[in-house]
Amino acid sequence: MHAALPYRLLNKFTIIISLIGVGVALVDSGFNLSNWLQQAFHLFYLVIIVLGFITTLGRYLRPKTRLTVNKVAVFDLLTSAAILVLLVLHFSDLFRSGLAGAVDGFVAIKFAVLVTFIREISDTNFTLNRAFLNPPQFFILSFLFVVFVGALLLMMPNATTEPLTFVDALFTATSAVCVTGLIVVDTATRFTPLGQVILMGLIQIGGLGILTFVTYFSYFFKGGVSYETQLSISEMTYSPRMGDMVATLKSILYVTFGIEALAALLIYLSIYNLSGMDTSERLFFAVFHAVSAFCNAGFSTFSAGLYDEALRFNYPLQLIISTTFLFGGMGFVIVVNLLRYLRHRAQRILYRHDARYTYQPWLLNINSRITLITSGALLLIGLIGVMMFEYNGVLAEHTSFIGKLITGLFTAATPRTAGFNIADMDALAFPTIMLTIFLMWIGASPNSTGGGIKTSTFAIALLNTLSLARGQSKVEVFKREIAEISIRRAFSIMWLSLLVIGTGVTLISYDQPELDLIKVVFECFSAYSTVGLSLNLTADLSTFSKLVVAAIMFVGRVGMLTLFIALLKNRHERNYRYPTEEITIN
């Protein structure tokens, strides 16, 4: 026990120093500093990296430590070798330049500092203290923390082409973390490549959540997650079985990065002949839009988004991006369940005589069935509506029927919280606007990167209404009875969403009575459902209205019901029940 004490102290010291190093690296990258200060920072980076080496070495040289070849040991070996090669190349470059080479742009050294911090903090025991913060409170505060830090990062001089006010930076950071896509400044012209990388990082963190990354790193390096942390995450994700939590988090990360990588490759191939962009710019465009699409963020590095003349008629690109954000909005658990089902079906076809691949009932669970059917029905309704209302409208510029069909499909799918637009939003017919508001309000599926009241909520409310109309006392579907708590939660989410949206419309209309009411309503629905579509109103909002919309985006991302749970004290169920009374409704 005493022998391990020096290592623990070294580990904690390295965490603190490397955390400071990450902050220094951000300041170094975001500000124009004097040469002597850059040289001092450079020396500080090297001290952190060497300290990380010593800590890693001490981890394996501790008494009673068995040297085994596992994934952590392989990771440490590969990262140590990569950093050694990096240092050799770096110092070789410095010596060739006579020790006068610029160091402020050496991104790899700063990245090595970040890797050191992640490695060391992941070796500590991560536990959510439920006595200090309950799961919803931790969830909300983690988002607030990322939004505030993101706003400060976006205000750095090297992140923008011209200074950004705090309100605009806060609005943009909130829109990115809440994966909304509403913008008050042009992403393409107001942000430098560094600023766009920061935006992409905020979108990825906001789409997956800090807890996903922290828990997975803790599991990867420590080999497990504490019982208290598993219980907290299960409560936040409404997981039915706590034992599946770690496996689910792993699947979420693998599916997310796998789909994003495939989408980036396909996007890159679809724009290979795009003029005015070199290879690196096309690669960044592909990666940025793959992350933005899967996370349902709607941000684009083009001023006009996908409505840009160079992209407007690129139908393969539209299909790739729409498929990507539909997968992201389907829900991580649903996607994993669907992939497992499809794999099983393929195995049954390929190995039909193998007893291991016989029929398995309920491999596609009830959540997946309800979500897929509801999503498919809403997509079909949206497509039919857009084709009817806009065939001679915004779709008229697409000469071929295939072009109209793909653009119509994209326009019907993007209100499901994606936020990309490939049509002039101001030119939409009024019925299309109303249909879009309806689709935005429903939004994506639960446990996804999208917002809205969610498809399952809408489906449960519809099923409950039908059961009441039929005189049934229970809600049944697919030979299963829907739990009463799910029905109660669904109706709470629905009326709370309308309360937040109505309050936002009232406040904005009071502050700016000159604004078109339908545009304000559209903006608030888009903000609450974290969609990002706008009838070109966002840039005209006052400072107060921007703050209102930012608050709506945040509430829509974390959920009003979650906020109530975080603020109100839990009351234990009593061991008795009062007499039941039926209330007159209509």
Image: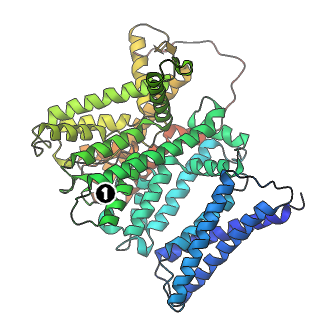
Colour treatment of the image:
rainbow
Amino acid type of the residue that numbered disc 1 sits on in the rendered structure: Leu
Residue furthest right in the image:
2
Q: In which quarter of the image is the N terminus?
A: bottom right
- Which residue is tagged 1? 541
Secondary structure beneath disc 1? loop
Above or below for 85 versus 93: above
Q: Can residue 70 be seen in this view?
A: yes
**In this view of the protein, which residue sits in the foreground, 146 or 521?**
146
Across and down, in percent, residue 159 comes to: 41, 70
489 to the left or right of 193: right
Q: In this view, does 371 lie above or below 140?
A: above
Q: Where in the figure is residue 334, as x and y percent of width and height?
A: 47, 32
Q: Left or right: where does residue 468 sit relative to residue 383? A: right
Q: Nearer the viewer, residue 152 or 302?
A: 302
In the drawing, does residue 113 fall left or right of residue 467? right
Does the rendering let one see residue 512?
A: no
466 relative to 174, above or below: above
Task: State which quarter of the image contains the C terminus.
Answer: top left
Residue beneath the point at 42% across and 36% down: 330
Residue 233 image offset from top left, x and y in percent: 62, 40
Q: Which of 278 and 45 is in front in this view?
A: 278
The x and y percentages for residue 300 are 32, 56
Place residue 501 in its image quadrant: top left
Q: Which of 170 and 5 is in front in this view?
A: 5
| In this rendering, position of residue 496 left or right of residue 52 | left
